Amino acid sequence: MSSRLLFLAGLLACIGAGCQDQQGTKLVLSFPNFKPGCIRVSVKDAQGAGSELTKELQESLATKTSGGQLVVAVLFQEGWGERLTFTATAFEQTCGAGPEFTTEKTVDVGRSGTEVRLTFEARDGDGDGYVSQENGGSDCADDEATVNPGRTELCNDRDDNCDNRADEGFERAGQSCGSAGACQNWACNAEGALSCQTGALRWYRDQDGDGEGTAQDSKEACTQPAGYVLNSRDCDDSNKTRLSTATELCNGINDNCDGVTDEGYNVGASCMDGICASQRACVSTTQAACKSVQKTWFRDQDGDQHGATGAGAPFCQSTAPTGYVASSDDCDDTKASVYKDAPELCDSFDNDCDSQKDEGFDVGVTCSAANDCSGTKACTPSGTTTECKATTPPTQYYVDNDLDGYGQSLGPLTCNTPSGYVSRGGDCRDGNPYTYPGAPELCDREDNDCNPATVEASVCPAGGESWASYVSDTADIWRSVALYNNGGVWIAGGDKLSLRKPGQFTFDDLSSCTSGADVYGIATDRTTGNALLGGSEGFLARYYPTTTGCTDKGKQSINADVKGVHLVPFQDKLESILVGVNTQVGINKGRAVRVLDSMGTGYDNKEIRYGLKDVNGPSRDLLFAVGSPLDEPLGSHIYRFDPATGNWTEESVPSGGAALTGIWVVNSKLAYAVGDNGTLLTWNGTTWSKVTGGPIQNLSAVVAFGTQSLYVTTLNGKLYYYNGTTWTELISASGVQLLDIAANNPGDIWVVGSRGVRYHWPQ
């Protein structure tokens, strides 16, 4: 602001036009209930800049009355900002004497100034220029103008000058003023003076000895009776601290017997105590203050009777507001189970607010959970204990009977990897390895992919699937069939040998390789198509269709009519297995021969108790041969090869079976053997047992893919299919013996027999 002189003046100085030309502000002082004798005004910068300037106003108040106002012009001073503090202090008579009545306000006056108003709230009820003691003034009787600190004390039994003493200077009152024996005493007259008066005086009982008596107990006497005084100013003659000259205390008692309680302390006046509207009340015997019921309460959001930590909220009430409590020891006010010293639960929370969670519980300790799973201890839902929870969920396993990698029946739920089970379910036929979710469709009358929405028409021949006949000369007797390389077919029997190479639709006659021998069996390398033939009197021959053709043919010195041949992997090549009937006389009617070298000149030749008809197995570990006594039509016999010793050991089979003619090993848990009179045996990886309900015919050969996909041929021209529940006749050839069956899968099957019959599914 620009440099200015401060000017404080009375109303007269601010009325003229010149006052309006000065840069400053107008201060209006109002006194609606009291006319001050003097007012001291001060103005200063609110931030302390510059100096504080003060002026006492007394002469300008001489003509004012209660309810008036005084206007003061304030001109801005060098260094002041725009925010100023205005303070006005009023006095009853002269500045600096007696009680002070102060009002103050800090205002942003701006550069051009603004009007500021200050009002004195003091009250002078009787208009004698003195404020009542109840309002902080010095007037002890503000309802009587003749009583105030400026009055002369009279002899009238009251405190005229408000010095807390009555009739001071008139101590002779009550004393004798006449001759002895005369009833004359000094007493106050109507003018308030002391005079000698004749007649008895009224004396008042002063029980408490404080020099003041009570109006309720008096007597007349010429001289002062003992225990009596001349005045009746005592309002409580049992308490010597209560009398007219006593100092009024703030205690709810009329100490000075003026009929008013706690005057001078403004008790009961409305006030604001912080945020609370209240009334002034005694805080000590010498002080009153704005006294409210104000208390800090703390939010209890979770209703556990413990409030949240941190700052609370003030309320003007002594009882808790709804949702609030007096304490602030809840470290988590969103959970009712959490507060200071709460019982610790097992719930991952610090229930007792001691900065520890779940103490006293073995949470996190390693343990063994259900289903063979490793786990750790975790809280139970009750929160009172722990339980072992698996760290990884167990896997549902399924029984996989057909070993296609998919199961159907529920197995164990476990974290281990149980043998014989798989983790993929959804197999719609668990006895057929060619049916599982997503399997390629075959022309086999099955829903291979386990999705009824898909159809297999696209994989079947045009015009529909059927058992196609590739019959040869009716004199031909085809005893054995072997398949290789997705389409290659070897067929042998008697002195005949035929080959249909992959991609061909006709058979090549290679019968010259039999040299007129009676051939019973043929086996092939499923990759190269190289074939091994076996027949009567030890006849053997090999045929290499892509290289040398027929080799090593002729009768070998193995003392056997070969009935069955088979190839199994051994080291990096295939080992030839021959079984049949012993041609030497003796107790042992059968022979099992292993060809030990590629030229076929080294043999491991074992005599077997009973004659053998067939041999099959995917490896040396799963290699079985079947047969029967040559002179006994009844009796089933199965032998298993022992790779460790090279011997064949007879298996335990159910009694009552007939001669066995065919064997097929599906996998390490499933094999089938067939024979006369409907004999059908199954092996589960450990034990052989009977399969009942099949055709009661002489069964000649078997091919199986699983427990629900089984094919058998019969000597009366029948081919049957078993789906695990029902037997279905697929071929019926009158006057024909069906002697062998081979298959790559249920969509590629060959059946051969007598009278030159050769059937293929599906065309």
Image (cartoon, rainbow, N blue to C red):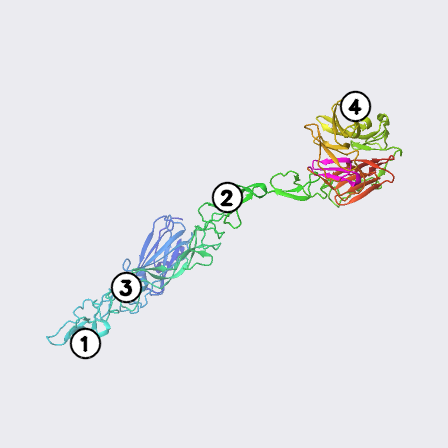
Residue with the mark numbered 4: 557
**Which amino acid, by three-letter code, is at mark 1?**
Glu
Q: Earlier in the sequence, mark 4 or mark 2?
A: 2
Name the residue tied to disc 1.
220
Residue type beneath disc 2:
Val
Residue at x 66%, y 40% (from the top left corner): 421
The residues tagged by marks 4 and 2 sit, at their Cα atoms, a distance apart of 78 Å
For mark 1, does the 10 Å Cα neighbourhood hold few (<14), some (14 to 19), or many (20 or more) residues?
Answer: some
What's the distance in space between the residues labelled 2 and 1, CA to CA? 98 Å
Question: Looking at the figure, which quarter contains the C terminus?
Answer: top right
Q: Is residue 191 above or below residue 704?
A: below
Q: Check disc 4 and give the amino acid type.
A: Ser
Which dot, 2 or 3, sits closer to the camera?
Answer: 2
| Residue drawn where x is 39% and y is 59% of the image | 293
Q: Secondary structure at mark 4?
A: loop
Q: Amino acid at mark 3?
A: Glu
| Residue ID for mark 3 | 248
Q: Earlier in the sequence, mark 3 or mark 4?
A: 3
Magenta-drawn segment: 657-685
Whether residue 149 is in magenta: the answer is: no
Does 61 sit left or right of 484 as displayed?
Answer: left
Q: Are marks 3 and 4 in contact (CB under 8 Å)?
A: no
- Of all residues, the one furthest to the front in this rendering is 586
Asked if 233 appears above or below 513 in the picture, the reply is below
**Residue topped by disc 2:** 363
What is the CA distance from the residue labelled 1 to the residue labelled 3? 31 Å
Q: SS of the residue at dot 1?
A: strand
Q: Earlier in the sequence, mark 1 or mark 4?
A: 1
Q: How far apart, in angstroms, are the residues tagged by discs 1 and 4? A: 175 Å
